[in-house]
Each structure stands twice: as C-alpha cells, then as structure tokens.
Image (cartoon, helix red, strand yellow):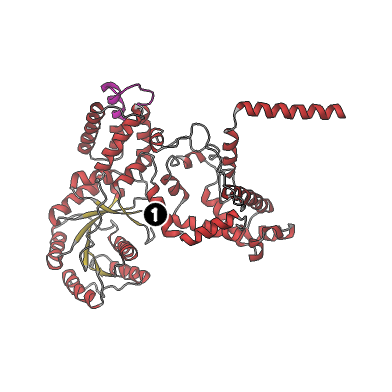
Amino acid sequence: MFDSLQDRLSNAFKKFSGKARLDEDNIKEGLREVRLALLEADVNYKVVKQFVDQIKERALGEDVMKGLNPGQQVVKIVNEELTELLGGEQTGLDLKASPLKVMMVGLQGSGKTTSSGKIALFLRKNHKRKPYLVPADVYRPAAIDQLHTLARQLDVPAYPSTPDMNPVDICKDALVKAQEQGCDLILFDTAGRLHIDEPLMEELSDIKAQCTPDEILFVADAMTGQDAVTVADKFNEQLDITGVVLTKMDGDARGGAALSIKSVVGKSVKFVGVGEKLSDMELFYPDRIASRILGMGDMLTLIEKAQTTIDEDEAKDMAEKMAKAQFDLEDFRSQMRKIKKLGSLEGLLKLIPGMGGLMKQLGDAQLPEDEMNRTEAIINSMTMAERRNPKVINQSRKERIARGSGNEVKDVNALLKNFNQMSKMMSKMMGGGKGKKGKFPKLPKGMPTDMDSMAAMGGMPGGMPGMPGMPGMPGMPGMDGMEDAGKRSISKKTLKERKKKKLGKKQRKKKKR
C-alpha cells in the first residue's frame, strides 16, 4: 500500500544527504518533497501541514546526535513523528470484558462481514475466546448466508437470523443464545448503506442502546482514501466508535486513510486486513507501519509470522540435519511450503530492513513464486526414495520426472545441481557436523550493519549485490548472488596475486610442451 509514499520519501531524504549541517534552507527544500509525498498519498491537507511544521520545528531545534549525519537525523525525526501520526502506541480491544461484545459498523461493501469472521478467528487463536457470530444485516442480499458460511468454516456458532426479523431484536436475543452456548465473544455484523442516512443511524443507535457493546469498530475500505476518514468522523459523532478496522491494506491504495484517521477522528486503527484469507487480519502497530513506510522493514512482524508457522522443535531438527548434511529434497519441499504460508516473497522482503526495493530491481526476471512453484512441481514428480536420496536419480529417472512435472531435463539437472551446492554450503555454515563453527559469507563492502544506516539509505534502492539477476537455485533464488558477494569481498591485491599465479602456471605448461 505504501510503496509510492516510500519511494517519494526516499527521494526527499536524499535532499539531506551530503549536507554538513541542518539549516532552514536545506530543511525547507527537503520537507517540500515530504509535503508533496504525503499530499499525493491522499493525506488530509491540514494533517500534512501540522506534520511538516512539527518536523521543521524539531529539525531546527535539535542538535544532530552523535553518530548520525544530518540526513539520518531527519529520518529519525520523521520516523518518530510518523509513529505519532499513525496513533502512537498499539491499541487493542478491551479484553477484560466477558462476554466481549463487539459491534461492527460501516458503509455497505467496506468488509464488515468478512472482518467479523477474521476478528473471531484472531481472538479465538490468540486469546482463547469462544466466538458467537450475529448476522444483523437483513437488507443486503445473502449477507446472512455469508456470515453463516464463515461460521461453518471457522466451526463457531452463529445466530439463526432470517431477513424478515428486526435487527434490534436479533441482537438482543443473540445475547441470550450466546450465553446459553457458553460463548465469551459476541460479534454483531450490522447493516450498512451506500451512504449515511437517518434510518441507518437510528437502527445502529438502538442496537447500541439495547446491547451496550464494549467495542464499536468502524470498518473502512482503505482504498477509498479521504472518503473513509470523512465517513468515520460522521459515524463517530453518532455512535462514539472505539476504534477502526482498515480493510484491503494489501491493495495499491495510497495510504491516506491510515495516515489521517487518528488525527481527524481521534480514534485509533486497531486492526488491518492484509489479504483475503480469514487468517489475514493483524493488529495495527503504528511504529511498525512507520518503519515500513521509511524502508526500514518490520522484523518483529516477520518473527511473529514465522513463530505461528514454524515449530521450534522442528526447526532444531532441521538445523541438525543441515549440520550433518542430511537435508534432503523432502525437507526442502517442506520448508518451501512453510515459506509460502508466511505470504508472498515480495511481502516478506518488505519486512526485512533494506530489502523492500529488491522486487523492483528484478524487472522482467522470473518471479520467485513462479520459481518456487516449478521447483515444487519437479520435487512432487519424484518418488519418496528419490526425494530422500537424490543421488539415485539417473538419466531415465530425470526424463520421467521432467515429463511428470511439465518441465525439461535441464530444469531437473539445475535443481539437483543447485540443491547439492546449497547442501554443501549449509553444512559448512552450520559446522559441517564435525563440531566446527560454521562460517557465514562476509557482507560486501558498503553494506549497512545498523538500522540507522539502513534508514538513511532509504531502504537500499540498489538491493543486495548479486540478487537482482536471481540466478540461483529454483525456490532458493539468489544463492549465486551470495557467491558473487563473497568474491567481491576479496581485496584487489589478492585477485592480482591469483591472476599472476595462474599466468605463471600457463607459462610453465607451455615450456614443458
């Protein structure tokens, strides 16, 4: 969502690079780009003015911290102010209440019904709540059926409402039914309209009065930009909402709603929808979003994603296999599938500091997901014995595997060759199974080693050396790039000496002939 804003801010920060000190002139020049970037992202103009004024005041009033250049100092200030603009600290739901009554409100098409199912799954998974879904939208065709379908997918109970029932009566009776079934989380999926009108607001006010919800979450489509903020403000005036849920945060909207809503409405974003799956609902962390916008990644979110997908004991077993060179194609396929569960590689790269711009460097090169799918197809065409022991794969077996996976023999050869190289490299890095300490390749010169340097570089627009060509192993792209990086870390003097030795050997061979 924030790609365009990230690019513009990165260009704005370049205005400060090379400056010996911060003064009013160069701050004004750089902040003009920041202002334009935020306005293009559809951020409220009053919010932009206040935001830029605060940065200017702080940049002129603060001494440059030791160890930071002026450009890095501005990035630090922008990061802190951006975090405040997004809401400051993460604000979750009031989980002390039992049962926790959550009322979902918003315009038609904003994603209330789907978000109800996603939040039910999130709270059941992370807080051991027992959800009860209440379909109170009797106006939209199939709205009740949609929520009942979600309830079946989640295996949770739902109130048996019908289109001829009164929404207020549905919600009142649902409180009794939920208590009878021992549910401690009740989600009211209320009706919406294409635009705000009196009958809708009266109905929602009656539901609020009769059911006294602990949370009233306004669901907004992030793709609508400033319109979402305006509508949220009106809902807040009538219902006093407790928070906001932004849907379609994985889309290509400019991000104006997320950046403006706290300042305009005064209520924090609590959840964000980041995909179409029921599991694609995340808590909104202002500091993490600010880091992503500034190209500094979001390692905490990446770690949390990994923890929910990868079992700790399984990871230890895999590490032992790698160290003993027992890592086979069956294990490799298993790890690939786990990586896929974490999300798209593009999305994962954006969470790694400095790697956000890598996909743009690829251009028309083969996409990592396509490479992984092809690799998995080849491995799937092998027998269990072949996956466990790739050495038994002879020419006839390769031809069979290629036919079965819809590829060519050369693709099978490339997979086996690169897998063998990767296994050797992993064994060395992990210690080779002989109690030796593994050695990781050195980082190339110029590679940042701290967060401040990464931030100042605006997300490493050049990407990791050797990565853009993606010449590595299918499914493990860029392995060749690591080899290239290692070559580049060798000094010029050493390379010259090696060339001299090679020339000397060739001359001696010629004399013998």
The percent coordinates of residue 89 (x first, y second) are: 25, 48
Residue 263 part of the magenta segment? no
Quarter of the image where one finds residue 200: bottom left
Residue type of the residue flagged with mark 1: Glu
Q: Residue furthest front?
A: 435
Quarter of the image where one finds residue 142: bottom left
Q: Give 267 or 195, whichever is nearer the viewer.
A: 267
Crowd class of label 1 (few under 14; some 14 to 19; many from 20; radius 10 Å):
few
Looking at the rendered structure, the secondary structure element under dot 1 is: helix
Quarter of the image where one finds residue 487: top right
Q: Give 321 or 224, whichever is nearer the viewer.
A: 321
**Looking at the image, residue 37 lies above or below residue 425:** above
> Is residue 54 among what the camera can see?
yes
Q: Count the marks.
A: 1
In the rendered structure, the answer to whether residue 264 lies left or right of residue 472 reads left
Q: Which residue is mark 1?
A: 304
The percent coordinates of residue 188 (x first, y second) are: 23, 66
Magenta-colored span = 16-33
Quadrant holding the C terminus: top right
Residue sitting at 23 percent across and 50 percent down?
A: 268
Q: Give 374 or 435, whichever is nearer the viewer.
A: 435
The percent coordinates of residue 221 (x first, y second) are: 29, 52
> Is residue 332 among what the camera can see?
no
Quadrant holding the N terminus: top left
**Looking at the image, residue 100 lies above or below residue 349:** below
**Looking at the image, residue 214 lies above or below residue 47:** below
The percent coordinates of residue 405 (x first, y second) are: 62, 59
Q: Residue furthest bottom?
A: 180
In the rendered structure, the answer to whether residue 162 lies left or right of residue 342 reads left
